[in-house]
């Protein structure tokens, strides 16, 4: 009887909701939810019961919605209920939210520039194109198609990313350890994305969203930033565009004109990041000073010392199991196996 009890205790420590909470525990849920999504997609699409493919807008959108729901939204709903976390944050005014939305402009410039440059040098080294695990291709760019794309490739994923990474995981890191989240959360965000061509841009995006989350004090800042990035991709597509991966075989297939816009866009993005960093910081300082007086600049969030573990507690068995699952997905993606 002693052995089953010990095994039960071990499983409880690995899979049970920890008290106090730690950030690494949630990542296993994201990995399991992703695995379940791909398994269901494989069963449904391989059965031939659907008339569209996984790379169609409808098919890719369906998988994206399932993955966002199972991997990000479900744990973000049930885990805080058991841990007593406030993952949504606090409302700090419309100013920070407007600045967050506008800061999507440099995010778009970074993504478009890095994709073009990174893809060129990757192909220049003789490697093949590595498609993201989830992508869609539409022949006709109608208004209905664009609306569906915005909903499924931006708004729904942005909500899940903001709630999970910048709500649940962010809340699982103590205030005194928040600086470390600027590296851990972006890396987990990149692992979850399963998007190799945009990997450098996603790392920068993840770091910037940490800054936005800190200055806005809520999850709606990162959400609006990601939504703003998609908005500016529409209005700035005549200035700089992202290379279409489906048209590439070798680096010679990439027109040199992409570099004429990509390099200046990186410079402009750097300037804009500096501007929005200052503006968001000023809004945050003004808000905290108005609410908490002269000591407001020292205020960040309510003390969470008793609700979450120390930062190092996040590197636990559950976290590393989640990493292993995502690494397997990345290996399959590099081998050209459609997930």
Image (spheres, grey):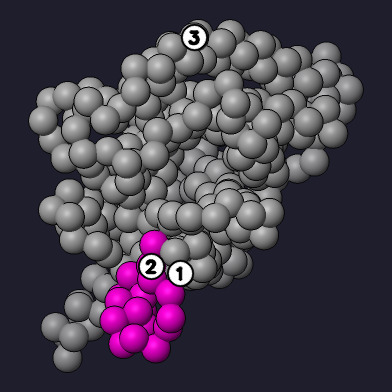
Counting residues from the start of the chain, the first of labels 1 and 3 encountered is 1
- How many residues crowd mark 2 within 10 Å: few (<14), some (14–19), many (20+)? many
* Neighbours of disc 1 within 10 Å: few (<14), some (14-19), many (20+): some
- Quadrant occupied by the C terminus: bottom left
Residue 249: x and y in percent read 21, 39
Residue 40, percent from left and from top:
36, 79
Question: Which residue sits at x=51%, y=68%?
Answer: 58
Work out how far the residue at label 1 is from the one at label 3, CA to CA, in angstroms: 36 Å
Q: Which mark is residue 229?
A: none
Between residue 38 and residue 316, name the one nearer to us. Answer: 38
Magenta span covers which residues? 36-55
For the residues labelled 2 and 1, say whether their Cβ atoms are less than 8 Å apart.
yes
Q: Is residue 219 magenta?
A: no
- Contact between marks 1 and 3 (CB within 8 A): the answer is no
Q: Secondary structure at mark 1?
A: helix
Name the residue rendered at 48%, 55% in the picture. Answer: 139
Position in image of residue 79 (x %, y %): 52, 65
Q: Secondary structure at mark 2?
A: loop
Q: Position of residue 173 (x, y in %)?
A: 49, 41
Q: Tell me if residue 307 can be seen.
A: no
Q: Residue 59 has which mark? A: 1
Task: Provide the residue designation for mark 2.
Answer: 54
How packed mark 3 is, by other alpha carbons closer than 10 Å (few <14, some 14-19, many 20 or more), is: few
Assign the N terminus to one quadrant of the image.
bottom left
Q: Nearer the viewer, residue 142 or 167?
A: 142
Question: Which residue, given by chain and number where applicable, does mark 3 sit on?
Answer: 264
The reply, left or right, for residue 234 in relation to residue 329 is right
């Amino acid at each position: 009887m002693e052995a089953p009890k010990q095994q039960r205790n071990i499983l409880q420590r690995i899979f049970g909701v920890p008290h106090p909470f730690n950030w690494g525990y949630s990542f296993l849920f994201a990995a399991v939810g992703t695995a379940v999504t791909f398994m269901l997609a494989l069963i449904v699409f391989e059965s031939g019961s659907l008339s569209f493919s996984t790379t169609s807008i409808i098919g890719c959108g369906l998988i994206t919605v399932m993955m966002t729901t199972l991997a990000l939204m479900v744990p973000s709903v049930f885990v805080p209920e058991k841990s007593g976390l406030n993952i949504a944050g606090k409302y700090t005014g419309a100013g920070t939210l407007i600045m967050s939305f506008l800061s999507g402009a440099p995010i778009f410039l970074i993504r478009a520039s890095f994709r073009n440059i990174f893809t060129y040098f990757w192909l220049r080294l003789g490697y093949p194109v590595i498609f993201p695990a989830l992508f869609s291709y539409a022949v006709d760019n109608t208004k209905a198609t664009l609306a569906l794309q915005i909903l499924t490739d931006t708004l729904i994923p942005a909500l899940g990313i903001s709630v999970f990474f910048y709500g649940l995981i962010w809340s699982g890191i103590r205030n005194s350890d928040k600086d470390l989240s600027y590296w851990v959360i972006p890396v987990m965000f990149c692992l979850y994305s399963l998007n190799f061509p945009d990997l450098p841009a996603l790392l920068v995006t993840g770091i910037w969203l940490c800054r936005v989350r800190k200055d806005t004090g809520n999850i709606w800042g990162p959400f609006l930033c990601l939504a703003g990035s998609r908005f500016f991709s529409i209005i700035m597509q005549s200035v700089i565009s992202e290379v279409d991966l489906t048209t590439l075989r070798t680096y010679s297939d990439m027109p040199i004109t992409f570099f004429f816009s990509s390099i200046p866009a990186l410079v402009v993005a750097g300037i804009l990041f500096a501007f929005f960093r200052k503006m968001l910081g000023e809004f945050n300082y003004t808000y905290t000073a108005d609410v908490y007086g002269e000591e407001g600049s020292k205020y960040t969030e309510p003390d969470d010392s008793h609700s979450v573990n120390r930062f190092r507690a996040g590197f636990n068995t559950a976290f590393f199991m989640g990493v292993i699952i995502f690494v397997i997905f990345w290996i399959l993606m590099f081998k050209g196996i459609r997930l």
